[in-house]
Each structure stands twice: as C-alpha cells, then as structure tokens.
C-alpha cells in the first residue's frame, strides 16, 4: 500500500465526486409523450362539458365547476410533467455533440417550455396538439442520438394521436 | 473520470499555482467536492468536464474561488 494511504488513515481525506448527480444513464421520453396526450385528453373532456339548459340549477353548476376544477388540475400537473421530463433529458442526457448534430434542439426545447405553459393557461386544443407534435419530435431526436430508428404509431389513447417508439 | 480515475482512488492536490487546461482539479460546489478536467479557462471562469463522455454529468463553469487544487498525485 502506498505510504500516503497510511497517512490518510490518520488524517482522513475528504471525498470528491466525479459526477454531480447519479449518472444512471436511464432516460426515456415516453413519460413526456404520455403527459402530452393526457393534456390533450383533459382539454377534450373540458370541451365536452355541457349544461342542460340556459339556466342550470345550483347543483348542476356545482357539478360542472367541480369537473372543470379536476380536469384543469390534471392538465396543469401533466404540463409540468412534460416540462420536467424534457428538461431532465435536455439538461442531463444531451451533450454538445448532439446539439451539433441537431442544431434545432435548443429551440425545440424552448418551444416545448412555452407550449406547455400555454397549455396550462388556455383550454386550446390546437395549442396542445402543437405541444404533442414538439414532444414527438423531441423523442425522435432522443432515440436517434442513441442510434435507434423510430416509428410513429397510433397511441391507442382516446386522443387518437401518435406516439414515437424506438424500433 | 474513468479510465484515469476510478472510484476509491486517492488524490493529492496542490493549490500554489493556477491550473491549466487539461489539468485535473478538485473544486467545491454547494458543499461537495468534485473531480473534473479543465477544458477552458475564461478570466475567472473555469469550464470543467468529466473524462468518461458516456456517463459523465454536466456541470456549469466554476469560479476560481471554488478551486481546491490541481491533482498532482493519484495513489
């Protein structure tokens, strides 16, 4: 054993890490895609709400308000999930060489952040479909950086949108 | 920092002179010590990077005041 190791037994050295977080290497844009679909579904369900007549009863108003509140809460939460998941992959996984190969990546992530914020602020089906489109594009770039071809398949969700999968 | 530095390696640092590009340094950030290689120095900012590109996590530039020292010996 090196002599300095004996010295270290007496004067304990501090620990230095080579990584600022756990480099698990496990990243997947799937959750962001599912969350984007969930937002679309919440907007659809809000848009489908109807009252029975021009002057709904107090009970019916309470029911509608309660439903809108619940749907909006889930919409808000999943917009944040989209932003969180995309930020993690963008900040922790993507490296300089990926950005060089996909120069639109930063702009795409910026758009996703803005589109997800808009999805929270509005009940706008067109806007949330644009968000899903951006997230799908992000997922394709992610898998391509891993050398995987991708395919867009029907999600099978009530949103009737697509989802990106690695082949 | 593999393959040059493996988990459990001990290092001795030296802080009497300023490190240069490609030197491996130990620095402090948010109360934790880190070991990285210098890739660029711009005035007071030191840009660092891990050696193992497959797993190394990114960390922003550090200020020279965060520098603990340059690694001069691994044992």
Image: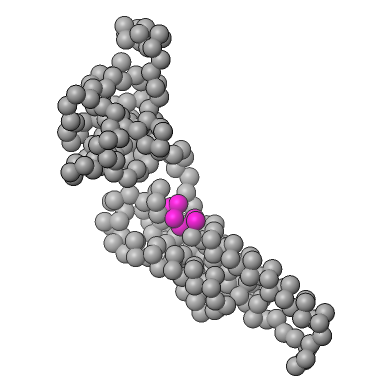
| Foreground residue among B4 and A116 | A116
Q: Is residue B23 magenta?
A: no
Closer to us: A54 or A125 = A54
Residue A85: in magenta span? yes
* Above/below status of B37 relative to A126: above
Q: Which residues are magenta?
A: A84-89
Can you see residue A144? yes
Q: Position of residue A103 (x, y in %)?
A: 28, 62
Is the residue B38 above or below the residue A153 in the image? above
Who's the residue at 37% across and 41% down the image?
Answer: B57
Residue farthest to the bottom?
A54
From the top left corner, tell me how far across and down residue A81 is, in percent. 54, 59
Q: Is residue A152 visible?
A: no
- Residue A110 lies left or right of residue A51; in this view the side is left
Note whether B25 is above or below B72 in the view shown.
Answer: below
Report which quarter residue B40 is drawn in.
Answer: top left
User: In percent of the image, x 60 and y 67: which residue is there?
Assistant: A75
Q: Is A15 left or right of A118, judged from the image as shown?
A: left
Q: Position of residue B19 (x, y in %)?
A: 19, 31
In this rendering, position of residue B57 left or right of residue B15 = right
> Considering depth in this image, is B34 or A144 the residue closer to the camera?
B34
Secondary structure mostly seen in magenta is helix
Type of colouring: one colour
Tell me where residue A123 appears, x and y as whole percent.
57, 77
- Residue at the extreme front of the image, as rendered: B65
How many marks the image carries: the answer is 0
Q: Quadrant of residue B45?
A: top left
- Image point 49% across, 76% down: which residue? A127
């Amino acid at each position: 054993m090196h002599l300095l190791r004996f010295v270290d037994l007496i004067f304990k050295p501090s620990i230095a890490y080579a990584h600022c977080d756990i480099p698990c290497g496990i990243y997947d844009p799937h959750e962001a895609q599912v969350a984007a679909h969930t937002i679309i579904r919440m907007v659809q369900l809000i848009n489908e709400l109807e009252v029975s007549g021009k002057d709904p009863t107090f009970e019916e108003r309470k029911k509608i308000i309660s439903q809108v509140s619940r749907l909006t809460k889930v919409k808000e939460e999943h917009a944040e999930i989209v932003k969180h998941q995309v930020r993690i992959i963008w900040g922790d996984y993507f490296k300089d060489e990926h950005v060089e190969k996909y120069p639109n990546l930063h702009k795409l992530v910026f758009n996703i952040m803005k589109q997800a914020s808009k999805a929270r602020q509005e009940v706008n089906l067109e806007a949330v479909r644009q968000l899903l489109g951006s997230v799908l594009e992000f997922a394709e770039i992610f898998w391509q950086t891993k050398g995987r071809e991708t395919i867009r398949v029907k999600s099978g969700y009530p949103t009737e949108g697509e989802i990106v999968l690695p082949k | 920092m593999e393959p040059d530095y493996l988990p459990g390696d001990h290092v001795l640092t030296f802080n009497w002179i300023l490190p240069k590009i490609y030197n491996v340094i130990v620095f402090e950030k948010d109360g934790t010590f880190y070991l990285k290689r210098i890739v660029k120095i711009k005035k007071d900012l030191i840009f660092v990077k891990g050696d193992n590109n497959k797993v190394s996590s990114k960390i922003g530039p550090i200020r020279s005041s965060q520098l603990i020292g340059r690694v001069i010996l691994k044992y």
